[in-house]
Image (cartoon, rainbow, N blue to C red):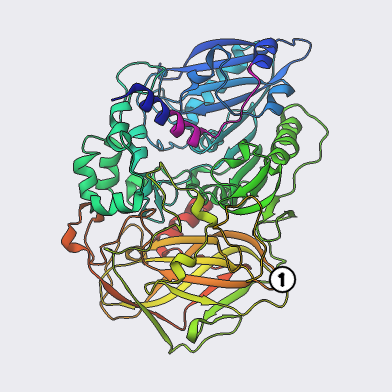
Amino acid sequence: MHFRRITLLLFLFVATISCGQEIDTLYLEKNYDLKEYRIPMRDGVELFTVVYTPKNTSEKHPILLNRTCYNASKHTDYQYGGYPSQYLVEDGYILVFQDVRGRYMSGGTFDNMRPNIPGNKPRNKKDIDESSDTYDTIDWLIKNIDGNNGKVGMYGISYPGHYTAAGMIDAHPALKASSPQAPIADFFFDDFHHQGAFLESYTAAFAVFGYQKDTLTREPWYRDELMRLYGNPAPDAYDFFLKTGPLKNITEKYHHDNFFWKQIVEHPNYDEFWQKRSILPHLNGIDHAVMTVGGWFDAEDLYGPLNIYKTVEATSPKAQNTIVMGPWDHGGWAREKGKTVHNHIYFGDSISTFFLKDIERNFFAHYLKSKNIHKLPEAYMFDTGAKKWEKFNEWPPQDIEPISLHFGENGKLFVNQPSDENTVFEYTSDPNKPVPYTSQTEGLTFTPRRYMSDDQRHASRRPDVLTFETDALKEPRVLAGEIMVKLKVAMTGTDADFIVKLIDVYPSDHENYEHNPDNIVMGNYQQLVRAEVFRGRFRNSFEKPDSFVPDEISDVNFKLQDVLHTFKKGHRIMIQIHSTWFPYIDRNPQKYVENIYKADIEDFIKSNIKVYGSSSIEIGGTQECCLPAPFQARTEQFIKD
C-alpha cells in the first residue's frame, strides 16, 4: 500500500463529509488562544475537546459547539480543519470541537445513530446517549471556560448535523440556538438507505463507520479497510458493482468483519434496531431557536432536514423554528465557489456567501449575542427553477396552487386532468441490465452528487423507463411543497422497486451555459428536479414486508421529498417511472426473498411491470400522509406523547 495514496483518499473522504471552508489560520493564531481538554461525562468516559477562546477579553463571548465523528484533532495547532465560516470566526465566539464517544481521541465505544434515552438530565450515570453527552459537555464548558456569556449554540453538517439535532433533546438551559445542517434523521430513510432501499453507492463509507478503534488516536485507524475498495478505485462504478454481483458478494469480499455492515445485513426491515435510532420521535418540547439547513440537491440527506424541521414545528410550539433550503448538494453552502453550479445548471453568484454572511451569521448573532437583527422568516427557500430566494410564513406553503399529474397514452402528461383508469402502461425491468442513475460515466465514489440535477435523456430513451411529459407550458407553473406518488401497479414478479422522477424539460432553443463543455447541450435538456426510490415490499409496512401476488393490482404510495421549482414558460413537465437506479441504489431481485443482502444471483429475474392510468402524482397543498399505516400510526403517537 502507498501511504500517500491512502492519505489522499482519506482527505478526499473527510473533505466530502465534513464540508469545511478555508479559514485564515494566521487570523486564528493572532486572535485566539487554543487549548485541549478531556471533558468527563456522567459515566466517567472522557471526550476529547478542542477550544479556541478569543484573546479579546473586553467582553464575554458565546460558545459555538461542534460535535463530530470526523476528528476534532484536525483543529489543533491552529491548523483549522474547516467550518464554521470566517464570518463566525471574526465575530468572536468561543469555538469548541469535540470528538463524539468512541471516535479518535475520545474514550468509550462508538455507536452509529446511538439510540436516545428519554429524560437525560435526571437519569442515572449508566444511561448515556448523544443528548446526555451534549448536556454534560455544555455544563462543563459553561462552568470551566473563562469569558463565556452563558449562551451556547450548536451547529454541524451531515453526521455532526445529527449530533446537533440530538443535542436539542432534553437540552441544557444554556443552549439557545441550534443549527442542524444536512442532518441525518433516520438511517432507514436517508443516508445509508432511502425509504428502505440500500444506497449501494455508500459501500465504501462502511470502512469509516464500521470499525472500533482500540486506542486513542489522532489518525484514521481504518486505512486498510478503506483500501480494500479504494486501493485502485474503479473508473466505472456501474461496471464495478454489476460485476461484483449480489450484495452477499460485498459481504464476502469487503465487509465480512465490519460491525456496521453486519447490522445492516441482519436488519433489512424497519425493526426495533432502526426504529430506536430515529431522532424524529424524540424531537419534542424544544424551546430554543432552531435553524435547519439543507440542499435541494443533496443525494444523501434531503429527508433529514425537511423532516427534522417539520417534526419540531409539529411538536415544539415554543421553538423559534426556521428552515433554509438552497441550490446546493451535501453541505455545499459551507464553501463559496463564486458561481453556484450544480452539475451543469447555473443558479447564481455567491449564493453560499449570502447564506453564511446574511443568514447563518445573523441567526447566531441574534440569539447568542443579543444583536438587534430581524429574525429569519419561517422558511427561506430557494426556487430552483426561477433561481431566486423566496420567503414563506409556513412550509409547506398553502397559498400556492397544488396540482395533480396524470398519465396518458403516447407519453402524454396531463395537469389536473384525470386519465382513463383502464389505460395500462408497461415495461420490462431486468436487474441484470439496470437503468444507470447518471448520464455520465462516474468512477467509484463515496457517494454520488452530480446526478441530482442531471440530464435524464439517457433514461427517457430506454424501453424500461416510462416517460410522460406535458405540452410546452404557456405560463410559468410553480410547484411547491410535498410530492405524493400514488401508483396502481401489477407485475409478473413478486417484488420491485419504483423510482419516480420529476423533470424540467428545457425548450429546444435554450442557450448553452458558458461554463459548460461543448458536448453539453441545454436545448431539450431534461433536468432532474426531484426523484426518490421506494422498495415495493414495504408498501404496507416498513416493519413487516410482504410479496406481491403476480398479476394482481396493488397500490404503491410514497412520498418524494419536497420541492420548490418554477417550470418556466416554454418548458415542459416530465415524469419518469422505472424500477432500477444503479448503482446509486442496490438492485431488487424482483423475486421476493426474505433478505436482499443475502440474495443469490439466481434470484434476480426479469419482471413485466404494469402501471395503470388511475395512478397520479400529487404536488403541493395539504397531502395525506402516504406512509404505510403502521409507520404513520407510530409517528402520530410520538407526536401525541
Residue carrying label 1: 476
**Is the residue marked by circle 1 packed among few (<14), some (14-19), or many (20+) residues within 10 Å?**
some
Residue 280 among those drawn in magenta: no
Q: In this orientation, does residue 79 appear?
A: yes
Query: Quick check: 127 left or right of 403?
Result: left
Q: Looking at the image, which is closer to me, 578 or 98?
A: 578
- Residue 577, percent across and down? 44, 70
Q: Name the residue at 46% across, 84% down.
A: 613
Q: Residue furthest right?
A: 372
Q: Looking at the image, which is closer to me, 164 or 447?
A: 447
Secondary element under disc 1, as helix, strand or loop, is loop
Q: Quadrant of residue 385?
A: bottom right
Report the magenta residues as a range.
11-25
Magenta-highlighted stretch: main secondary structure?
A: helix
Q: Quadrant of residue 259?
A: top left
Q: Is residue 412 above or below residue 340?
A: below
Q: Residue furthest front?
A: 518
Q: Name the residue at 47% across, 17% down.
A: 48
- Residue 309, percent across and down? 59, 48
The N terminus is located in which quarter? Answer: top left
Q: How many marks?
A: 1
Q: Name the residue at 41% across, 64% down.
A: 628
Q: In this orientation, does residue 122 appear?
A: no
Q: Is residue 475 above or below residue 202?
A: below
Three-letter residue code for mark 1: Pro
- Residue 560, percent across and down? 51, 62
Query: Quick check: 626 left or right of 290?
Result: left
- Residue 332, percent across and down? 59, 41
Q: Looking at the image, which is closer to me, 294 or 6?
A: 6
Q: Quadrant of residue 207?
A: top left
